[in-house]
Image (cartoon, helix red, strand yellow):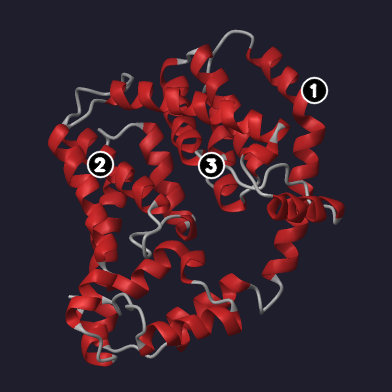
Amino acid sequence: MSALTPVFRYDQNYISTLIAMRGNAIILFLLTLLKIKPTEEDFYKSFKVLSIITLFFSVIAFFIPQLFFDKGQLYNLYVRQLRGSTDILVAWPGNGAMILYFFLTLGKSIQNSTKKDFIWCSVCMLYILLMQNRSTLLGTVPFYIYGLFKVDIKYKKLMLAIIVLLAGGMIYNIISSLIEESSAQLGDTKYNRWQALYFYLIEYKNNIYTIIFGNGSPCAGSTYLEYLNQAVTKRLAILSDIGLLGSYFFYGLATMILFYSIIFKGIINRTVPLSVKFYCIWIILVPIIHSFAHGMDFTGTVRLLFVMYLILYYSSNPKELLYDEN
């Protein structure tokens, strides 16, 4: 239904509009998972392998960055570091695997008090801290702290002391830098996320139809695309910066109600394990880091659909959990 908006509002060709919205085919990812029904153990083992691969290449990228990044990217990183930035890498490919594995191991370590999973969870947490994405930290640090109090393993205090001694100073510097940067940006009315929120959710002219079904995707060469590009170039109002709120602009309340009904189900359904509940709370509290079919960028979409699958799977298979609900 959202495809009709640019057709009638901006005279886009219907076929071109459908091509522009081809990213919606990513929903096949969810349907495929529902068809093959991978088990929790499959996910746990798979993301462990992916996390190890991510860590391996992250270490190589730190010591030999020229293998992965060009000179211009490395120069920009060097300039940011000279200006006080605590960034250590240009980019963090594979971070989605580390984040998902963090939640899986956190939930398992809390439920079963397994030292091995808690150590892996701590490794993932350290990786996330080094990555320094504020939206991700908001969705992981509180749950990790909760896990520290809830997990019951031998030598927990000794492990915490080692973590503080080895990484305490670095973590303090990172958090201080992020707080300072956040304060400066949130107080700036020209901050790109404020601009995006104001333009797409307030300033943009909507009607009942676009509120319910969205504005659809622009196609190449259309006046609709030109209008959105002007918002990007002149005001830095980038739709992807506001995540699911940007998805609302494209697909409307109908789609968002469907998504959020599944997310809330993940929180209130007792058969859904703790790790998935944590992730659902993160989606609700920090919607800007998840999205659905923003063009052909599927990173946030895949994570969102993956969690939705877990909710649907756990709800329909309450006796086949990765760890026992005690």
Q: Which label was assigned to residue 123? A: none
Q: Does 38 sit left or right of 139 as displayed?
A: left
Q: Is residue 259 above or below residue 13?
A: above
- Say which amino acid is labelled 1: Leu
Q: Does 97 sit left or right of 272 as displayed?
A: right
For image coordinates 27% across by 35% down, the residue present is: 270
Q: Cα distance, mark 2 to mark 1?
A: 39 Å
- Look at the numbered discs 3 and 2 and tell me whether their residues touch, using CB distance below 8 Å: no
Quadrant of the image occupied by residue 255: bottom left
Percent coordinates x, y for residue 96 in the rendering: 47, 41
**Nearest to N terminus: mark 3 or mark 1:** 3
Please tell me whether mark 1 sits on a helix, a strand or a loop. helix
**Nearest to N terminus: mark 3 or mark 2:** 3
Find disc 2 in the rendering and name its residue. 309
Q: Does 24 sit left or right of 175 as displayed?
A: left
Quadrant of the image occupied by residue 234: bottom right
Find disc 3 in the rendering and name its residue. 93
Percent coordinates x, y for residue 48 in the rendering: 44, 23
